[in-house]
């Protein structure tokens, strides 16, 4: 039934109350259907769960109707249905609250295990790729682990070493030397550095303590590095520095000789020649002869000094050839002593020989002559008037010839003997009659004797004279030959 409402603008037909309720209900149903259609449950576990439950109940109603006429089958069906319903309700709970967390945990554990394996592999690679020997010891010094380079250096397999004590695999003397240092690490927790030589190789060992959570030492790590190459380089640098120092000393000595020792003889020459140039007409024959003797003595000293300088220069440049040969010793000594006989005669110094006539040596004639002249010249220079010089030579048991030159001169103290062959210490002094000395002669002699594989020694005491000994090979097959 419709009613009409009259208004000023016109008439409008309104629905009655029943029609209004019916329309409202229809709108609600339409809205509900729309919401259900728009509900997006696809892909959600809850969506599948509800569909499964709905399907179970629908199937149950159909099957109950079909099996109602067969009670035994109906009972069996009820049991199966109850089990199915239990599984349907319990499985999601087990999945969400048991299996899923367990799966996540297992996945994380597997990831952690894989990361741990990778980390261990990386550490093992670093452990074995280093060129240091690494040992890991327990507190009782049992070897727990070591790297490959350590096993290679010990020439023992890792399996044979692990489980043994360190003292079982290293020599007793080395173990005894390391014992105090290992004790310091284990007892005091100190880091210790130990440098040692093993079979010609230099090693540096670092001993580190490993602590537990209570700060107690439970492990000992030993890192051992081969520093032989580093040592060799350091020794080479040291040797080069010493050579540079010696070169500087030699340079200073050379300039000192030029500035002082060469100048003095020339000053004497200049003074004497000036005296002769100015006063020669008024001089007697005796005065002229005295000046001539003095000039000759200065010339002789100057010649000897220049000869030593030239020999030293050639020696430093390495241009002196070494050409040993067999020859009789006595004739060669007599030949080189001839140039010293006049100086010895002027000082009334007696020269005696105690050398077998048939004694042979295997030496460089030129170098031997230089040795004899320099040592004998010093003997004459530092022996006072009326002294004595004795030259002796004899064969030794080790196939050498020992030559000694003894004088009754002024001798030397221990300090002078110590510095006798050092260029950086001024050990030169004037002879008993003012003869000049540079100290170069003995240094040249020492070098020449060592080229023969021999040694130069000296015995001396102040006021009692000196004896110089040196050795030469008797034949080229002796062990001392260069």
Image (cartoon, grey):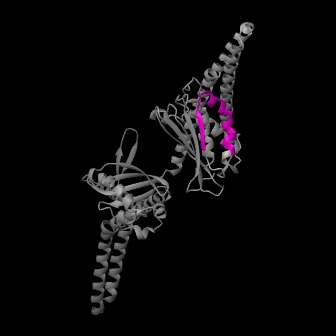
Number of disc labels: 0
Q: Position of residue 415 (x, y in %)?
A: 46, 33
Residue at the (56%, 56%) spot, across then down: 398
Q: Is residue 135 above or below residue 267?
A: below
Q: Where is residue 452 in the image (x, y as percent from the top left)?
A: 63, 48
Q: Is residue 335 magenta?
A: yes
Residue 342 is inside the magenta segment: yes
Using the image as rendered, state which of residue 138 and residue 423 is in the foreground: 423
Looking at the magenta stretch, what is its main secondary structure? Answer: helix
Q: What range is drawn magenta here?
A: 331-353
The quadrant in which the N terminus is found is bottom left
Q: Looking at the image, which is closer to me, 353 or 140?
A: 353
Closer to the camera, 333 or 5?
333
Task: In the rendered view, tell whether residue 121 sits above or below residue 251.
Answer: below
Residue 294 at least partly seen: yes
Q: Left or right? Give the position of 469 relative to 93.
A: right
Q: In this view, does 166 lie above or below 360?
A: below
Q: Residue 246 appears at what percent x and percent y?
A: 57, 34
């Amino acid at each position: 039934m419709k009613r009409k409402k009259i208004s000023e603008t016109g008439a409008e037909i309104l629905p009655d109350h029943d029609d209004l309720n019916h329309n409202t209900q229809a709108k609600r149903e339409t809205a509900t259907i729309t919401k259900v259609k728009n509900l997006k449950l696809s892909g959600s576990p809850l969506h599948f769960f509800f569909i499964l439950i709905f399907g179970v109940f629908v199937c149950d109603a159909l099957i109950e109707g079909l099996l109602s006429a067969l009670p035994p089958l109906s009972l069996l069906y009820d049991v199966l249905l109850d089990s199915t319903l239990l599984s349907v309700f319990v499985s999601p709970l087990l999945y969400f609250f048991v299996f899923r967390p367990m799966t996540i945990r297992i996945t994380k554990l597997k990831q952690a295990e894989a990361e741990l394996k990778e980390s261990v592999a990386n550490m093992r690679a670093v452990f074995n790729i280093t060129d240091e020997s690494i040992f890991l010891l327990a507190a009782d010094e049992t070897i727990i682990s070591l790297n490959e380079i350590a096993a290679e250096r010990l020439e023992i397999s890792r399996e044979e070493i692990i489980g043994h004590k360190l003292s079982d695999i290293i020599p007793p003397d080395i173990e005894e030397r390391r014992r105090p240092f290992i004790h310091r690490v284990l007892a005091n927790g100190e880091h210790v550095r130990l440098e040692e030589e093993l079979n010609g190789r230099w090693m540096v060992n670092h001993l580190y303590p490993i602590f537990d959570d209570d700060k107690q030492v439970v492990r000992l790590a030993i890192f051992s590095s081969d520093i032989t190459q580093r040592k060799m380089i350091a020794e080479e640098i040291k040797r080069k520095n010493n050579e540079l120092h010696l070169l500087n000393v030699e340079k200073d000595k050379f300039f000192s000789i030029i500035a002082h020792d060469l100048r003095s003889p020339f000053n004497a020459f200049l003074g004497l020649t000036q005296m002769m140039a100015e006063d020669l007409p008024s001089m007697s024959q005796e005065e002229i002869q005295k000046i001539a003797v003095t000039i000759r003595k200065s010339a002789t000293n100057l010649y000897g000094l220049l000869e030593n300088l030239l020999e030293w220069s050639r020696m430093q440049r390495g241009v002196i050839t070494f050409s040993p040969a067999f020859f009789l010793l006595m004739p060669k000594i007599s030949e080189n002593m001839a140039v010293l006989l006049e100086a010895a005669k002027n000082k009334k110094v007696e020269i005696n020989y105690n050398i077998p006539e048939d004694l042979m040596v295997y030496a460089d004639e030129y170098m031997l002559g230089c040795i004899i002249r320099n040592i004998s010249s010093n003997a004459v220079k530092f022996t006072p008037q009326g002294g004595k010089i004795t030259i002796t030579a004899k064969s030794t048991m080790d196939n050498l010839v020992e030559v000694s030159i003894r004088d009754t001169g002024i001798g030397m103290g221990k300090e002078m003997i110590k510095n006798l062959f050092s260029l950086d210490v001024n050990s030169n002094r004037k002879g008993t009659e003012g003869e000049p000395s540079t100290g170069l002669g003995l240094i040249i002699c020492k070098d020449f004797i060592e080229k023969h594989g021999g040694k130069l020694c000296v015995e001396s005491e102040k006021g009692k004279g000196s004896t110089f000994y040196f050795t030469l090979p008797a034949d080229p097959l002796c062990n001392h030959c260069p």
